[in-house]
Image: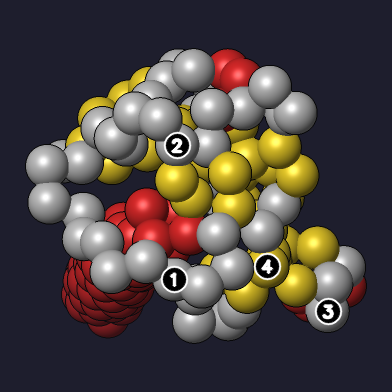
Amino acid sequence: MQKKYKLVVIVILSLFLIGGASMVIIKGVEHLRIEKQKRQKAESIKESKKEIKEQAEARQKIALWVVQHYEGPEPIKMIGVGKIYTSGILGSGGKSVSVIINDEEKNIIDGILIGDDFNPRHPGAQFKSSDYNYVEQAMDKKLDGIEIKYWGENNSNDSEN
């Protein structure tokens, strides 16, 4: 009888030890999974911030190019720079962007071709009634006092500066 009792106690203790060890392993794996998710989220946020910074720098370059290559009867006070589009498979068709000058629809310049360094390479199309004309030779102008905005797809102007 005592052997039977010892065997039952050993079996019960073994089950508790196996169960406890299993719980520790499960908790450890869960902890590792959560830590990995946190790391991935942090990396994703870091990449997003980097992309936002690159987009802002690209808009600055594009706005400077517009100021230096477009002239009109009134000074440029605001440039809205749209989303940068990549064409073709893996960007083989290049990149383009649209801008609006002084928040007037007739002053939209559509499809400005830009290089991989986000420097514009070729002027886009614009309305015949536009107040601003393209000048081939770059003028010596700066962005001082000019507001640069993100010009969204629905033509809403969300300030960037």
Q: Which is nearer the eye, 70 or 23?
A: 70
Q: Amino acid at mark 4?
A: His
Residue at x 73%, y 29% (from the top left corner): 127
> Does residue 138 sit above or below 66 in this rendering?
below
Which residue was labeled with disc 3? 92
- SS at badge 2: loop
- Give the spatial CA distance, label 4 vs label 1: 12 Å
Quick check: 58 left or right of 126? left
Which residue was labeled with disc 4? 122
- SS at badge 1: loop
> Does residue 119 sit above or below 60 in this rendering?
below
Which residue was labeled with disc 1? 138
Q: Amino acid at mark 3?
A: Ser
Quick check: 80 left or right of 23? right
Which tag is nearer the camera, tag 2 or tag 3?
2
Residue 54, percent from left and from top: 35, 67
Quadrant where the C terminus lies? Answer: top left
| Precedes in sequence: disc 3 or disc 4 | 3
Which residue was labeled with disc 2? 72
In which quadrant of the rendered view does residue 26 lie? Answer: bottom left
